[in-house]
Image: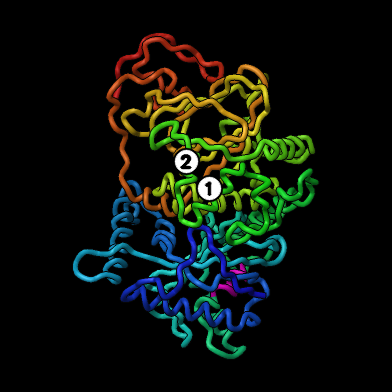
């Protein structure tokens, strides 16, 4: 049954409804949304059994959370579909229209949205609680009178990984609500009483989380094959999580709470000063957190003590135990051959709580543009030692904010990180910093900060890496124009990438083949090239 959830949420303390200021269409939508939430919490017995809980008060959210996926475009301009430039212009027009509906005068005010979190469960293989973010904008209408005209369905984003035909990178395909909304409302109305749009959405979310498609997808056999493939993939993931017998079961919770609290005893995980600083930061005091930060590279690379040594040993031991269990192992990325994707071995919920409690507030403090609204992550371990991967070529991460924590093992030598400039900037191939790992210490940086792992000399180094991602930031950045800045000087040799770089040997006079480079590099001189 639905339980009233008064949580602090993922991003900030929830303001009281009286403190939220909105005007025009947004105020109307907000009041309708609150009314629908009040009705749900007044009669939780009327909700589907699959709604575990839902928050009672909306939080302010970025407008990007309410945008549909980018429409399909035609790069050549002759396919009958809009060009990428036309599609971008249409998105800008929609945002400006939303802003003008809220503000006054000719200048549009920033568009706004509101969201609540819920936990949803379905049937096997989707029988474990999944966090769902429900977001509305100024075009939300309750529709309790049975009329949907003029209103738009909320945007739904699953914050826990799921293999499902109707979920694309976390987003529930919005077409499903247009197809099933009216029939779902009629079915619910037969039970008596008004049926709000939010009530319909919750019922549909539970309905799609079963092992049978809620509708006939289309007339092609390919759609049913795709559905079966997604279900099999989810079952395989569930099997891996249920068959593995961990050393430390607390690292494998069955769900992530809406605000990351109540499951993990963080005082056993984090160093005391970080635990204290996070509490102070939550209360609005930034000073303790800033005091424990080391600015390795001004405004770009920071480090701070994070895990206790005992927890590093615990996590490292669990990773080694899994690797020796005979369970299937998928390597973390295309660059590293040794390590584990923790999200796929049953530790995703623990890592999600780490993101909520630790990575989110720190990222928001240090990198507010990229880190304000983190809503997904790719968490994995990497291992470097003689006879395996020695190091890693210069690269960028598929993340918005990266957290990289050294777990061990004691006694390794070398194996640091070389940092260069930010990708596409004029100094992106200019040496900036050589960072030395310390066990338990986290180094954080933007994903587009170029860096490489230096070759290890002795011992074994294992790191936990969390690629934190923000769908809101990525949508904003996708609408912007990004061009490579012309390089103002020859690059540093340490900043050349032999596997990921664009014209990696340009400017170089003498090239030495790296021990980690998989391709031979010519030793003759290259001419200056832009």
Q: Is residue 466 above or below residue 119?
A: above
The residue at which mark 2 appears reads as: 291
Hey, which quadrant is residue 214 in on the image? bottom right
In 3D space, how far apart are the residues under numbered discs 1 and 2 (Cα atoms)? 9 Å
**What x and y, as percent, mark residue 266?**
64, 50
Q: Mark 1 and 2 residues: CB-CB less than 8 Å, in contact?
A: yes
At x 75%, y 39%, the residue is 322
**What x and y, as percent, mark residue 106?**
19, 67
The residue at which mark 1 appears reads as: 277
Q: Is residue 171 magenta?
A: no
Q: Is residue 207 magenta?
A: yes
Can residue 39 be seen in this snapshot? yes
Comparing 245 with 125, the one in front is 245
At x 47%, y 11%, the residue is 512
In the picture, the disc for residue 515 is none
At x 69%, y 40%, the residue is 311
Comparing 301 with 252, the one in front is 301
Decide which of tag 1 and tag 2 comes sooner along the chain.
1
Q: Which residues are magenta?
A: 201-208
Q: Is residue 352 above or below residue 175?
A: above
For label 1, the SS is: helix
């Amino acid at each position: 049954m639905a339980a009233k959830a008064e949580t602090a949420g993922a991003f900030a303390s929830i303001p009281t409804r009286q403190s939220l200021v909105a005007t025009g269409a947004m105020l109307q939508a907000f009041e309708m949304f609150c009314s629908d939430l009040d009705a749900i919490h007044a009669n939780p017995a009327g909700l589907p059994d699959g709604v575990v809980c839902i928050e009672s008060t909306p939080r302010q959210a970025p407008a990007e959370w309410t945008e549909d996926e980018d429409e399909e475009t035609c790069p050549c301009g002759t396919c009958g579909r809009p060009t990428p430039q036309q599609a971008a212009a249409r998105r800008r027009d929609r945002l400006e229209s939303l802003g003008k509906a809220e503000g006054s005068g000719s200048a549009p005010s920033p568009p706004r949205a509101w969201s609540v979190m819920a936990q949803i469960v379905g049937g096997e293989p989707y029988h474990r609680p999944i966090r769902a973010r429900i977001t509305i904008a100024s075009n939300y209408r309750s529709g309790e009178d049975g009329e949907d005209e003029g209103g738009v369905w909320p945007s739904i984003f699953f914050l826990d990984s799921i293999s499902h035909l109707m979920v694309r990178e976390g987003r529930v395909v919005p077409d499903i609500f247009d197809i099933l909304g009216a029939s779902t409302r009629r079915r619910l109305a037969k039970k008596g009483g008004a049926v709000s749009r939010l009530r319909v959405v919750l019922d549909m979310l539970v309905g799609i989380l079963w092992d049978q498609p809620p509708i006939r997808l289309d007339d092609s056999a390919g759609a049913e094959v795709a559905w079966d493939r997604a279900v099999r993939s989810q079952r395989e993931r569930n099997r891996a999580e249920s068959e593995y017998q961990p050393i430390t079961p607390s690292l494998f919770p069955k769900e992530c709470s809406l605000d990351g609290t109540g499951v993990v005893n963080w005082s056993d995980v984090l160093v005391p000063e970080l635990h204290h600083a996070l509490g102070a930061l939550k209360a609005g005091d930034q000073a303790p957190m800033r005091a424990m930060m080391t600015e390795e590279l001004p405004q770009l690379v920071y480090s701070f003590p994070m895990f206790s040594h005992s927890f590093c040993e615990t996590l490292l031991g669990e990773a080694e135990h899994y690797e020796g269990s005979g369970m299937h192992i998928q390597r973390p990325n295309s660059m590293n051959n040794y390590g584990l994707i923790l999200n796929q071995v049953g530790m995703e919920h623990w890592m999600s709580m780490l993101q909520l409690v630790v990575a989110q507030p720190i990222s928001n403090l240090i990198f507010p543009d990229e880190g304000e609204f983190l809503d997904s992550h790719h968490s994995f371990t990497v291992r470097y030692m003689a006879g395996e991967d020695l190091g890693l070529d210069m690269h960028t991460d598929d993340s918005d904010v990266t957290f990289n924590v050294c777990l061990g093992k004691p006694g390794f030598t070398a194996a640091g990180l070389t940092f260069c400039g930010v990708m596409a900037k004029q100094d992106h191939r200019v040496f900036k910093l050589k960072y030395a790992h310390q066990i338990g210490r986290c180094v954080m940086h933007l994903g587009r900060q170029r860096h490489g792992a230096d070759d290890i000399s002795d011992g074994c180094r294992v790191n936990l890496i969390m690629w934190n991602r923000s769908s809101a930031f990525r949508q904003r950045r996708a609408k912007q124009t990004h061009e490579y800045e012309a390089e103002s000087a020859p690059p540093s040799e340490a900043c050349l990438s032999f596997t990921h770089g664009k014209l990696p040997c340009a400017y170089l006079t003498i090239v030495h083949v790296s021990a980690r480079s998989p391709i031979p590099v010519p030793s003759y001189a290259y001419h200056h090239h832009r």
